Image (cartoon, rainbow, N blue to C red):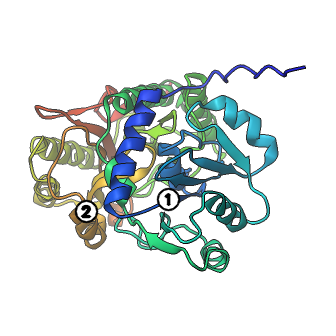
Amino acid sequence: MIKEPRAPLALPQISLAERDRRWSAVRDAMRERKLDALFLCGWPLMWDFKVANARFLSTIGGNAEFNLMVFPLAGEPTSFVSMPTFLEGWKRAQNWVADVRPRKGSWADSIAGRITELGLERGRIGLDGLAGPLDPDGWLPHSVYTRLRELLPHCELVNIEDMLEAMRGVKSDEELGILERAAALGDRMMAACRDNARVGVTESAVYASMIETMIANGGEEPTLFLWAAGAMPPQHPFVVPQHRALEAGDTIICEIHPKYAGYTTHIERTFSLGKPDPKRQAIYDGCINAYETGLALMGPGKCISEAVYAAGKSVEDRGLKLCELGIHGHGLGSLEHPRFRLHALKADQTAIKTIGDAFVPGMVFAFNIDLFDPNWNNGETGTVFAETILITETGARRMHSYDMKLQELPIA
């Protein structure tokens, strides 16, 4: 008796036309570099950002799943996931990759076995997860790399650095549609904070309402969500909320990366339970001024570093200091291309050389401005603001629609 395949899972799907576009572009890049195959180390680190390259070519990822992928120059790719019990789920979750296998033995054993099956024991294999302009440390485990060298002594293992990250820096129309969904989730999450943060309600309950909003409306975990609250919260939010009741006069600062189909946008806001201190309001006004200054200089062909430096100058002119200020790309990961941040200038001056110092239509990035006043409370508290920006053919626009003002919440 023939067993009928089970129905696909009711999860967001990306079209086969988009798959073919990506596979064709990547294989063109492989030919330029004379690569016979790619080994993509989809390691679920930093809210799954390190699985982005493998997910870009397979849509397999999320829920902290591994996806170690062999992508040949010709023929079908293979994705290795962590356990056989997950196999059926990933086959039903997507229709891009038919050859999904569980790891057998070590990860390196599984990868080397597939490369051998393809007859590429003497091939030139490109690896991600080694050091590159965006990540000077990489994420490919040393044990996996050394074991591959042992199992494939005649293969040439090549660091592809930011080859795929550079390609992912400009989004297709289909990707932009997904990112619009992610941005809408962020607007809903901020509204949940606005509507639930009240005196006597615990921080953790407000945080939970925001996560519930994302998941209930089609979002995906894990995702970055940083939070801090109190009379004098720090310059930048921490990772998780406290189990304490909110009080009158508290300030909430939060940074969220709402995620849909693996794609994240970035929004930050500052909330005040009651009227904000005039000093805090002045810092927030500095955030908005820096944002508007930088945004006015963004658009196709305009200079990335010039826009960021101008925003930074506006902060200096107000006597404020930055905790963070700059842009970084968003998509299947955070800290993608384009990336230029004044608080990480040396690293990003190197990273920007990969793609050039100019905005290109289809770039999507966070523009975040987190500031403090060094003359108020020893500079130990401040405000945050961020938006996701899309570069269009004619300019730049925000992808979120949530109110940009410092959010004053009722205390009764």
Give the distance between the C-alpha atoms of the residues marked 1 and 2, in whole angstroms.
20 Å
Task: Name the residue that disc number 1 marks.
Answer: 38
**Residue at the location (51% across, 68% down)?**
123
Residue 347 horizontal side relative to residue 154, left or right: left
Apparent side of residue 226 relative to residue 360 in the rendered image (left or right): right
- For residue 264, above or below residue 400: below
**Of marks 1 and 2, the one in the foreground:** 1
Earlier-in-chain disc, 1 versus 2: 1
- In the rendered structure, the answer to whether residue 254 lies left or right of residue 105 reads left
Q: Which mark is residue 110?
A: none
The mark tally for this picture is 2
Q: Is residue 412 above or below residue 117?
A: above
Q: Which sits in the foreground, 235 or 109? A: 109
Q: Position of residue 289 (x, y in %)?
A: 16, 44
Residue 400 or 166: which is nearer the viewer? 166
Residue under the image location 60 percent in, 54 percent down = 44
Look at label 1 and name its amino acid: Leu
Q: Foreground residue, 107 or 265?
A: 107
The location of residue 392, given as percent across then percent down, is 18, 33
- Closer-to-camera residue (77/270): 77
Q: Residues within 10 Å of mark 1 (few under 14, many from 20)?
A: many
Residue 354's disc number: 2
User: Does residue 266 appear anywhere in the picture?
Assistant: no
What amino acid does circle 2 point to?
Thr
Question: SS class of the residue under badge 2?
Answer: helix
- Evaluate if marks 1 and 2 touch, with contact meaning CB atoms under 8 Å apart: no
